[in-house]
Amino acid sequence: MPRASKQESRTASRRRIRRAVVLPIAAVGLVSGLIAGTGAFASASQQRTARRPHTIHIVTTQTAIAVNSAGLGGAADVRAQVFTFPLPGGQSGHIDGSSTLMSPSEQLSHVAFVFPDGQIDAQAAITLPPTTFTAAILGGTGAYEGVGGEVVNVVVSTTPLTIDRTLHLIYPGQDD
């Protein structure tokens, strides 16, 4: 095999040095770009989450009620209820609720808070007569997809039934 000339040897040596310097620099640049891109994604994700409400305060008024006397006036009677509430900007929302009487002193209630951009479902066992109670948020749809948390309810009037409600929302992937 013929020997390489000094010129070819120097050229090959320069290529090895160039590769040894350029490849790590390129790798660092690539990793930095990925990290910066991830930071931008995380920042955009945090901004999207930050725009979501974490607390919603509404005052609801019962506008309709119907009773199914399956329990003949006792346990197993079911009440369907509709509550309405005003929202900023002149919009309104409503609650579709269903309560089953479990005993003379307790009912199981499931409600769907219906907003223009989605709904939130909640459920609670309520001691009768209700004055204050907390409901678990079971999930949601639309802008509230997958949400959890709780609803703190305070009865402010019984004629018509008016309840001050504060929804404390926790979104999927949210740490607090």
Image (cartoon, rainbow, N blue to C red):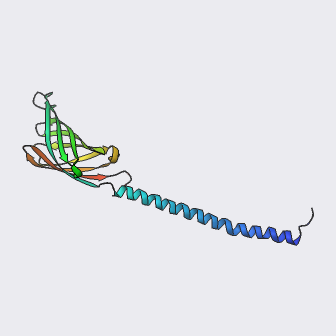
Q: Nearer the viewer, residue 35 or 132?
A: 35
Q: Position of residue 59 (x, y in %)?
A: 16, 49
**Residue 139 located left or right of residue 34:** left
Q: Which residue occupies 33% across, 47% down?
A: 143
Image quarter hosting the C terminus: bottom left
Q: Give the quarter of the image for residue 93.
A: top left
**Residue 47 located left or right of residue 18:** left
Q: Nearer the viewer, residue 69 or 10?
A: 10
Res 40 visible: yes
Q: Position of residue 34 (x, y in %)?
A: 54, 60
Up-down relation of residue 147 to residue 101 (above or below)? below
Count of residue discs: 0
Q: Position of residue 30 (x, y in %)?
A: 59, 62
Instruction: Work out which residue is located at the far right of the displayed protein and give it.
Output: 2
Q: Position of residue 54 (x, y in %)?
A: 29, 55
Q: Which residue occupies 26% across, 55% down?
A: 55
Res 175 visible: no
Instruction: Work out which residue is located at the far front of the displayed protein and give it.
Output: 90
Q: Which residue occupies 89% across, 69% down?
A: 5
Image quarter hosting the N terminus: bottom right
**Residue 158 located left or right of residue 110:** left
Q: Give the quarter of the image for residue 28.
A: bottom right
Q: Which residue occupies 25% across, 50% down?
A: 150
Q: Nearer the viewer, residue 105 or 28?
A: 28
